[in-house]
Amino acid sequence: QQPVQSPQAVILREGEDAVINCSSSKALYSVHWYRQKHGEAPVFLMILLKGGEQKGHDKISASFNEKKQQSSLYLTASQLSYSGTYFCGTPWNTGKLIFGQGTTLQVKP
Amino acid sequence: DAGVIQSPRHEVTEMGQEVTLRCKPISGHNSLFWYRQTMMRGLELLIYFNNNVPIDDSGMPEDRFSAKMPNASFSTLKIQPSEPRDSAVYFCASSPGDRGREETQYFGPGTRLLVL
């Protein structure tokens, strides 16, 4: 089943923070985060493999709560370049990823 | 590395015509994925190959769609006959195929298909 992301859309000013959530009704064994800029392909950001894990990529970090079957992506002091659509992906046992519906982030000057 | 290569990048065709999309995965990658992206339905997985064998085609919408992977460096997605509702961006992605939960997918630039 498709993971659910919230919110669907966020509008920020440069320098503001944002949180994007991803939750699943199925047990999560890992969570993948991708970003897609307008007119481009999705690009891998990071993967979280175990509960309690946190990772960072520039000023973008993520956490994974295995028990709650959810992950959160944190964007700190957002920059214009952060604009795009963020997808979380959860793996199925056949090896494929099921992506959430995406969260559109717009950072304004 | 050249990354995942897709062709054509843009395709405009008329309803009823056959459309063939092509993909060359990253060398050494054993898994290949075809996705379709639309505003209404988001990013949908159509079919997934591992070692050139289709593993999961549950996302293929109907018999008009078919996909092949004759060798490790080439895959095609064919739509015959095409319909206006097939208009979308089609992405191909590849991954190493041997890293379990750590698999990272690398997407190609996509093919923008418009069926008139």
Image (cartoon, rainbow, N blue to C red):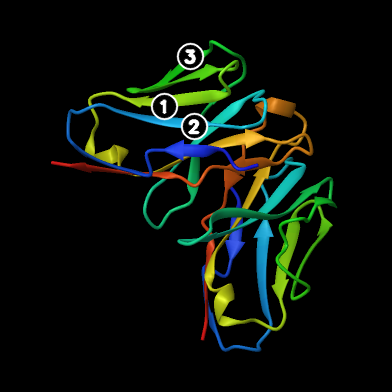
Return the chain for callout 1: A
Badge number at residue B64: none
Which quarter of the figure has residue B29? top right
Q: Mark 2 or mark 3, which has the lower sequence index?
A: 2
Q: Mark 1 or mark 2, which has the lower sequence index?
A: 2
| Above or below, comparing residue A54 to residue A10 in the picture | above
Residue located 24% across and 30% down the image: A78
Foreground mark, 2 or 3, reads 2
Q: Position of residue B61 (x, y in %)?
A: 70, 66
Task: Tell me which amino acid carries mark 2.
Answer: Cys
Q: Which residue is mark 3?
A: A54
Badge number at residue A73: 1
Q: Which residue is mark 2?
A: A22
Front residue of A78 and B38: B38
State how far apart marks 1 and 2 are (Cα).
Answer: 8 Å
Dot 2: what SS? strand
Contact between marks 2 and 3 (CB within 8 A): the answer is no
Task: Tell me which amino acid carries mark 1.
Answer: Leu
Q: Mark 3 or mark 1, which has the lower sequence index?
A: 3
**Extreme residue toward the left, this view:** A109
State how far apart marks 3 and 1 are (Cα).
Answer: 10 Å
Asked if residue A79 lies left or right of residue B91, the reply is left
Task: Tell me which amino acid carries mark 3.
Answer: Gln
Q: Are marks 1 and 2 on the same chain?
A: yes
| Above or below, comparing residue A35 to residue A16 in the picture | below
